[in-house]
Image (cartoon, grey):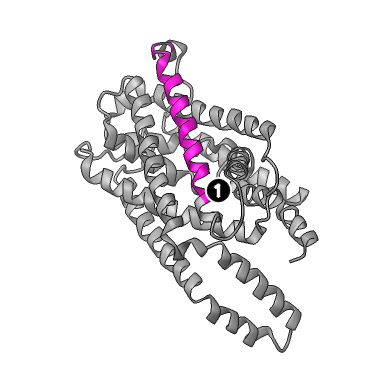
Amino acid sequence: MSDVEQAAAPARVLPSRRRLVMSVLISLIIGAVFVWLLKAGALPVVPSGTALGAVPLWVPVAYAFVWLVVLFLRGVRWYWLLRPVTDVSVRQVLYASFVGYAALVILPLRMGEFMRPAMISRHSNTRFFTATSSSGAERVLDGLILCVFMFTALQLAPRVEPLPDTIGQLPVPANLVPRAAYLALAGFSAALIAMAVFYWWRSFAVRVIQLVFGRIAPRLASWLTVRFEQLTDGLSFLKTWSATGPFVSISLVYWLLNAAGLWLVLRGCGLAGIGFWEAAVVMGVLGLGLLTPNAPGYFGAFQLSVYAGLALFLPPGEILGRGVVAVFYIYVLQIGVILLSSGAAALLGPGPRK
């Protein structure tokens, strides 16, 4: 790929105006469905001012700080996956990551997933397709680590017995939550195996491309080969523990701190029945709930996911009391810190191109 093509690649992934409008409309419909579900389930979004004021000030302040550290760890670990294939600085990775966080919040249907590789490609020598495959691989590894963490927490956290047949007043059995967790664990495990096969058998795939397209469309075969090689370059970390080791280590700290932060705010809001492992399960339910395309700001899917996690451990009366306050604080603080920190990153810039 020439320098001109490399510079243009990020621009080509940006959606057209028509596609963006359609995506916004679809995401608003999804958001409206979630609002209806929350109302139908009698699951409030905003608690009373009195209930909010009853929470000590140090709770939201401490959680905002913990969440900012979590975002930093989440961003910096990508550096270790990119390092085997490109010369990129930690500052450039953090810049792309924080701008990407805001894009995920603002843009509909998870279209912001492409912003991070686009930013790292624009401000470094990293090829866009390489950055995209590396970002996708990070999602697979991260999802697998989260599912293993959640699976462990489900074994250690005592649940209410029997599990309720509803979440709020929604006729959704709470036992669907652990089933979904086990299904996600199997799915991410399969994705990791597929990713490894994709990388280690890449030479065979290139030969297949040349065999199928080489004679009838040589230029297409060449284009596909180049793109395929760029995609597999993003998986080069698989062959070296010096890259995967730091990534996995930082990810473990990231998820442990994430769970600890949720435990802090849930307990701070008065939910005494929530311990660390219960908070870890809530974190896992939230993480899985936000994987699917949703409305801007994760609105609706975010609240419903936290409520679903709490339904495993708390009686309905407590969820619809102090639980509402906790859900509100978690949502507002996470989204608020993301937008503020992303704005600060945009002002600071990515630093000089290496």
Is residue 240 left or right of 225 when viewed as pictured? left
Image spot of residue 75 (x, y percent): 52, 42
For the stretch drawn in magenta, what is the main secondary structure?
A: helix
Highlighted magenta segment, given as a residue range: 53-79
The local secondary structure at tag 1 comes to loop
Is residue 105 left or right of 261 when viewed as pictured? right
Is residue 181 left or right of 223 when viewed as pictured? left
Which residue is label 1 attached to? 293
| The one of 204 and 17 positioned closer to us in this rendering | 204
Image spot of residue 101 (x, y percent): 58, 40
x 35%, y 39%: residue = 256
Q: How many marks?
A: 1
* Quadrant of the rendering where the N terminus is positioned: bottom right
Query: Mark 1 is on which residue type?
Result: Pro
Which image quadrant is residue 340 in?
A: top right
Q: Is residue 252 magenta?
A: no
Residue 328 is at least partly visible in this image: no
x 69%, y 31%: residue = 347
Image spot of residue 276 (x, y percent): 28, 33
| The one of 73 and 47 positioned closer to us in this rendering | 73
